[in-house]
Amino acid sequence: MKHTGFAIAHAGMLFWAVLIAASFSAAAQVSQAIDPILLTGLRLLFCALAFLPLLLFKGDSVMTARGLFGHCVLGLLLAVYFGSLFEALRYTSAVNTGTMFTLVPLLTLGFEAMLMPDSNLKQRLWPMLIAASGAALLVMKGTGPGELPSLYALSVYGVGCLAMALYSPLSQRLKTRSLKGRGPVAMTFWNMLFGALFLLTFCGFSGGWRSTSLLTTTDVYWLMYLALFATLATFWLLHRAIGVIAPSSVIAYIYLSTLFITLFHWLWGRQSPLPLEALGAVMVGAGMLALLSSSRRTIPVSAGR
């Protein structure tokens, strides 16, 4: 398998951050009457189907039982994260879930220490703490007293954040074992497929599938956009970077997404940044630059143990 260079991997993740930031505006265009778990399941399913021709063309579709199980576990982690997110949003605000999500890269660092103990973790801890603090300032703008999440929402989304934090280091670990030699296309296809199956199965039991009748042609267009650019492209870029960049550094690019969302708000909303927002933006930029300089150690995907 051809390896992605360090600079290309980081450039791809920079584009990943832009796509993630733009996806929030696109997601808002889809009817709110549609069950969000159903919507996410369809997004992941469309992603898998879009990658199927390329997977067959590359001849990377052969699957072993161990490999299938590995993809099943990774798909389950995706399903747990998205399911917990939408369940938590029933009881708390997007600001609170966004604030909690800033902990995911730090949790990823912890899982990375357990699954990949030879990783150089200490050099990345402080840059990530700085970037996380800056992202928290950006996310929490405009919040006031009485907006703290309920214990239930905190617990449910906490489980989802743990699942998402485990996703990247476990992917890299499995690439040295049962998923050895798997490229970004195969990883994205199988993980998306299993994630979609778990979510759509849940909708079958919960009754969320009934909202399918509420889909309009416009909703389908936006759904296809979200599937191709906000999901398929981002997960392909993510899996292309995993193995070249340490997993915690990869997922830390979510802090840049938070920064880009704020920049879009400033530029298109023509609103002046608040002092805390400006401080948060500087902290995210400084933390990510420091993280970039500390993550130059290349980790080959196919390296065995």
Image (cartoon, rainbow, N blue to C red):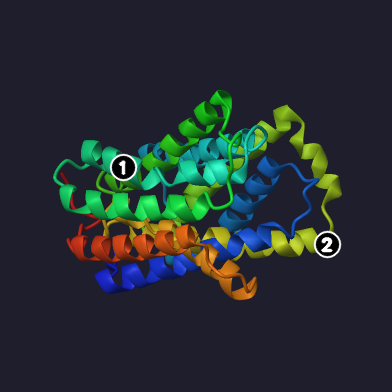
Q: Which mark is residue 217?
A: 2
- What residue lies at 50% left-to-right and 66% top-to-bottom? 260
Q: Position of residue 229 (x, y in %)?
A: 57, 65
Rendering coords of residue 13 (x, y %): 39, 65
Question: Which residue is drawn at the image coordinates 69% and 48% (left, top)?
Answer: 39
Q: Is residue 28 above or below residue 195?
A: below
Q: In the visual, does 191 lie left or right of 175?
A: right
In the rendered structure, the answer to whether residue 227 lies left or right of residue 305 reads right
| Element type where label 1 sits in the image | loop
Q: Is residue 8 above or below residue 224?
A: below
Question: Residue 292 or 208: which is nearer the viewer?
Answer: 292
Residue ID at (52%, 47%): 98
Task: Residue 289: give x, y in percent of width and height.
Answer: 28, 66
- The disc, 1 or 2, on the residue closer to the chain's N-terminal end is 1
Q: Residues within 10 Å of mark 1 (few under 14, many from 20)?
A: some
- Residue bearing mark 1: 178
- State left or right for residue 101 relative to residue 244: right
Can residue 288 be seen?
yes
- Residue type at mark 1 is Ser
Q: Quadrant of the N terminus?
A: bottom left
Could you say where residue 46 lies in the image, as x and y percent from the top left? 63, 56
Res. 59 visible in picture? no
Q: Disc 2 residue type?
A: Thr
